[in-house]
């Protein structure tokens, strides 16, 4: 059998070096290319057509989610495993909907990476236990609408209702209604708590 050909994508060279060392110890795998951002990941995928792509999410130029979407649009058979520090359920679902077949926290690389590569290469989907539990916990939660997410992002940026209304061309009363819905859907006590939950679950990123 030929070795599983791997592309490692991460904007931190120390992470890519760690992946290279792990993969390099295996007789059934080889690291064929590396990339430091999403745009480069798409280029390297086109060039090498790896069996498995290991994809970080938070990167410059093009995010991991966008890179996954771009790769899968060109190569629907591409097998991609997300490697990230983010365990938020919304972030996980975005990655899976974009076409990722695996989702692994970077803290578990040594313990689970090689097994996950083999499983996804064999056609399985693989989420680490912590990720699966987080997704299950929020499976029945009401999702925020795009407008509510926009409001939450502006709250995270320190904007008052009047400022949010001006930026989104809404009335203050409308903004108050959106804030009320956000708190209710997230089970938040106040605006600050809502932002904390939003960041933890991957609904919004830091402004």
Image (cartoon, helix red, strand yellow):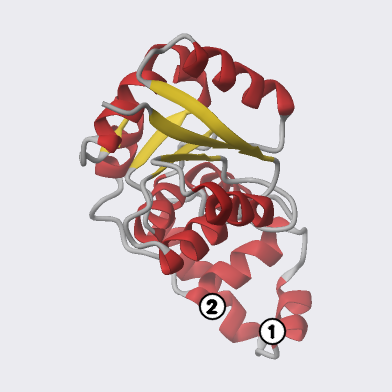
Q: Is residue 112 positioned above or below 38 on the image?
A: above
Q: Is residue 192 visible?
A: yes
Q: Secondary structure at mark 1?
A: helix
| Residue 113 percent coordinates (x, y) | 41, 22
In the figure, residue 27 lies in which quadrant?
top left
The front one of 75 and 153 is 75
**Residue 64: x and y, percent?**
57, 51
Please state the total of marks drawn on the protein image. Answer: 2
Query: In front here: 38 or 183?
Result: 38
Whole-number angstrom distance, CA of label 2 to CA of label 1: 9 Å
The structure residue drawn at horizontal position 76% and vertical position 82%, both measured from the top left corner, is: 167
Mark linked to residue 27: none
Label 2 close to label 1 by CB (< 8 Å) = yes
Chain-order first, disc 2 or disc 1:
2
Write the residue at 45% across / 43% down: 50
Residue 167 higher or lower than 179, as above or below: below
Q: Quadrant of the C terminus?
A: bottom right
Label 2 sits on a secondary structure element that is helix
Q: Residue 191: where, in percent of width, then height?
A: 61, 55
Mark 1, other Cα within 10 Å: few <14 / some 14–19 / many ≥20: few
**Which residue sits furthest top?**
25
Label 1: which residue? 168
Closer to us: 144 or 60: 60
Q: Residue at x 35, y 39 (%)?
A: 102
Q: Is residue 128 among what the camera can see?
A: no
Which of these two is toward me, 51 or 129? Answer: 51
User: Badge 2 local density, few (<14 within 10 Å), some, or many (20+)?
Assistant: few
The residue tagged 2 is 147
Outermost residue on the front side: it is 1
In the drawing, does residue 205 fall left or right of residue 157?
left
- Give the quadrant of the N terminus: top left
Q: Position of residue 29 (x, y in %)?
A: 41, 23
């Amino acid at each position: 059998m030929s070795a599983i050909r791997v592309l490692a994508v991460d904007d931190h060279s120390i992470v890519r070096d760690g992946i290279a060392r792990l993969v390099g110890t295996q007789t059934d795998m080889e690291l064929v290319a590396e990339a430091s951002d999403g745009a480069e990941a798409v280029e390297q995928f086109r060039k090498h057509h790896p069996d498995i792509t290991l994809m970080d999410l938070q990167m410059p130029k093009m995010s991991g989610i966008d890179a996954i979407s771009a790769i899968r649009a060109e190569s629907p058979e591409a097998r991609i495993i997300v490697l990230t520090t983010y365990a938020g359920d919304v972030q996980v679902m975005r990655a899976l909907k974009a076409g990722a077949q695996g989702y692994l926290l970077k803290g578990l690389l040594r313990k689970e990476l090689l097994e996950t590569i083999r499983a996804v290469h064999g056609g399985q989907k693989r989420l680490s236990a912590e990720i699966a539990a987080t997704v299950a916990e929020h499976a029945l939660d009401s999702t925020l609408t795009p407008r509510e997410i926009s409001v939450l992002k502006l709250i995270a940026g320190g904007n008052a209702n009047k400022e949010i209304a001006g930026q989104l061309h809404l009335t203050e009363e409308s903004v108050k209604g959106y804030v009320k819905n956000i708190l209710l859907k997230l089970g938040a006590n106040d605006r600050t708590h809502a932002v904390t939950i939003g960041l933890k679950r991957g609904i919004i990123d830091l402004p």
